[in-house]
């Protein structure tokens, strides 16, 4: 349900902005790191920029990030052999930010942006593997190794700040390299490095 | 402006990367049953083997008792042992979630199997009023144990020597209350269970703490003991609330051991009664066949 609400909100915002002039559409893929839990992964984002002035645009976008990390444990506690922990994270995010445009008309330009983020994400941890002690005959286990952990989901708020270096490759096209950080309150923050293209008209 | 901003952003990134790493630990969920589960018998689900992490820590527990993966039949509990009536006629899954103080949850589902191997037959005995018997087939590593118990409380024809309930329905439920001397010589094949044999039945039914319930519960594979009460000094007492079943063991010349169950307790106990007291009777016999 929350995903649907976010999608509808995104579409409404996109529709509103689409009706304005001086537009750019950006699509990018990213490498993502979540330093707090040492998770790494990938993501993608789609965003729209609307020019308000020579140095200022307004940007709204949405993206998806998935990251993971496996910690080998191989230790015995009591009768239990702890095998590994799998951290996993998946999150959708929606953001809006003013963009400071530096060198807009030049072959190489820079965008700086910062703004609020709404993030719908699962928390870390989705599997904990361990070997249990021998069970009596009347307890059946499909495997001696146990898979566990309920993923905790939620909608969280935070902020995003980042920059892009844009390289003009055609009259309407640019390629960009970017880096941004997303700080999510009470959830998982990330650092992202991205590469993408943008189309302006 | 441009360079300063980029450096500021990179600095922010480095701060983010270098922040203290949070290596979360996840609790370990384990649960066991202390006795062989049987349909409708009470069992203790014991999750005390679970732990929050290797350094300890508190846990909370909740259970999916019907294994439907939909609803949790209990709230979060602070105690790891839960007594429930086993809900499956044959096999089923029971789920456990444990939650540590950080709110991290580990979930474990285990398949639980029952192994009912019994037959209910008419018992051919020397008694005037027939009773049914239940034959349990139990297998050990090198033997087959045929364990035969009366499935009804023994009934005798009316006599001044013992006590019969006035109504036939009560007689069918409660049987006849009789002295130990009458009970011990009722039949040439079936005999009063000794304390040891009753104890085996108690263990079969979940141990002292639960056997009182499990020996009364209306499950076909159980003894379904009733609570007729006890007659002492020609006075019927505790009818409907307690049952006293003779064992074959004397305590001394004038008294003998009896098993006591109560309608309001899951527990059983052995008590000493005067042999002249009138109590209930279940008979039994058993055979062992060893494999060579």
Image (cartoon, rainbow, N blue to C red):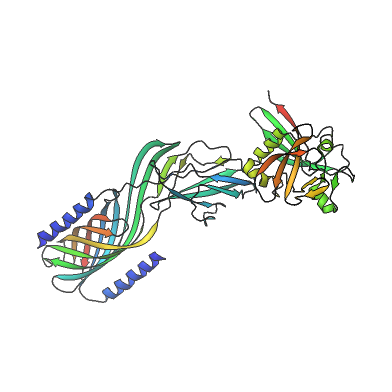
Comparing A175 with B164, the one in front is B164
In the picture shown, does residue B249 fall above or below B19? above
- Lateral position of residue B263 relative to residue A76, left or right: right
Q: Residue at x 81, y 52 (%)?
A: B170
- For this orientation, the residue located farthest to the front is B233
Q: Residue at x 51, y 35 (%)?
A: A134
- Lateral position of residue B4 relative to residue B112, left or right: left
Displayed quadrant of residue A7:
bottom left
Position of residue B160 measured from the top left corner of the image (x, y, whole percent): 90, 44
- For this orientation, the residue located farthest to the top is B292
Position of residue B92 measured from the top left corner of the image (x, y, whole percent): 58, 48
Position of residue B109 measured from the top left corner of the image (x, y, whole percent): 51, 47
In the picture shown, does residue A85 fall above or below B169? above
Comparing B169 with A180, the one in front is B169
Comparing A14 with A74, the one in front is A74
Comparing B229 with B194, the one in front is B229
Task: State the quadrant of the N terminus of chain B.
Answer: bottom left
Displayed quadrant of residue B157:
top right
Position of residue A14 measured from the top left corner of the image (x, y, whole percent): 29, 71
Work out whether residue B95 can be spotted: yes
Task: State the quadrant of the C terminus of chain B.
Answer: top right
């Amino acid at each position: 349900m929350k995903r649907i609400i976010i999608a509808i909100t995104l579409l409404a915002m996109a529709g509103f902005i689409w009706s304005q002039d001086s537009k750019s559409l950006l699509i990018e893929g990213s490498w993502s790191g979540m330093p707090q839990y040492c998770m790494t992964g990938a993501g993608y984002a789609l965003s729209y920029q609307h020019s308000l002035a020579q140095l200022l645009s307004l940007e709204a976008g949405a993206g998806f990030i998935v990251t993971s990390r496996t910690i080998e444990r191989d230790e015995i506690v009591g009768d239990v052999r702890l095998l590994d922990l799998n951290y996993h994270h998946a999150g959708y995010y929606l953001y809006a930010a003013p963009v400071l445009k530096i060198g807009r008309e030049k072959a190489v330009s820079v965008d700086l942006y910062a703004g609020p983020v709404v993030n719908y994400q699962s928390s870390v941890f989705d599997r904990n593997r361990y070997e249990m002690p021998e069970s009596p005959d009347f307890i059946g286990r499909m495997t001696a190794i146990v898979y566990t952990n309920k993923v905790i989901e939620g909608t969280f708020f935070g902020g995003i700040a980042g920059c892009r270096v844009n390289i003009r490759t055609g009259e309407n096209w640019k390629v960009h390299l970017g880096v941004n950080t997303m700080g999510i309150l009470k959830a998982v923050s990330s650092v992202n490095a991205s590469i993408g293209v943008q189309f302006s008209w | 402006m441009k360079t300063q901003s980029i450096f500021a952003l990179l600095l922010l990134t480095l701060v983010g990367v270098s922040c203290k790493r949070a290596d979360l630990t996840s609790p370990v969920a384990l649960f066991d049953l202390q006795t062989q589960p049987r349909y409708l018998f009470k069992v203790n689900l014991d999750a005390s083997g679970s732990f929050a992490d290797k350094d300890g820590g508190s846990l909370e527990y909740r259970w999916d008792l019907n294994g439907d993966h939909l609803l949790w039949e209990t709230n979060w509990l602070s105690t790891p042992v839960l007594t429930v009536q086993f809900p499956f006629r044959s096999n089923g899954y029971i789920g456990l979630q444990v939650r540590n103080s950080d709110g991290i949850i580990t979930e474990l589902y285990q398949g639980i199997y029952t192994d009912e191997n019994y037959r209910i037959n008419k018992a051919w005995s020397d008694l005037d009023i027939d009773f049914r018997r239940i034959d349990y087939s139990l297998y050990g590593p090198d033997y087959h144990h045929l364990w035969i118990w009366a499935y009804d409380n023994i009934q005798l024809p009316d006599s001044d020597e013992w006590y019969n309930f006035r109504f036939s329905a009560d007689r069918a439920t409660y049987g006849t209350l009789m002295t130990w001397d009458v009970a011990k010589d009722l039949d040439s094949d079936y005999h009063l269970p000794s304390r040891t044999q009753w104890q085996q039945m108690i263990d079969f039914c979940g141990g002292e703490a639960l056997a009182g319930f499990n020996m009364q519960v209306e499950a076909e594979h159980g003894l379904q003991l009733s609570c007729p009460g006890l007659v002492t000094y020609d006075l019927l007492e505790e009818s409907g609330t307690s049952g006293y079943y003779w064992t074959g063991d004397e305590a001394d010349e004038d008294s003998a051991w009896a098993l006591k169950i109560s309608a309001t307790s899951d527990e059983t106990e052995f008590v000493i009664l005067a042999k002249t007291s009138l109590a209930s009777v279940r008979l039994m016999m058993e055979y062992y066949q060893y494999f060579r």
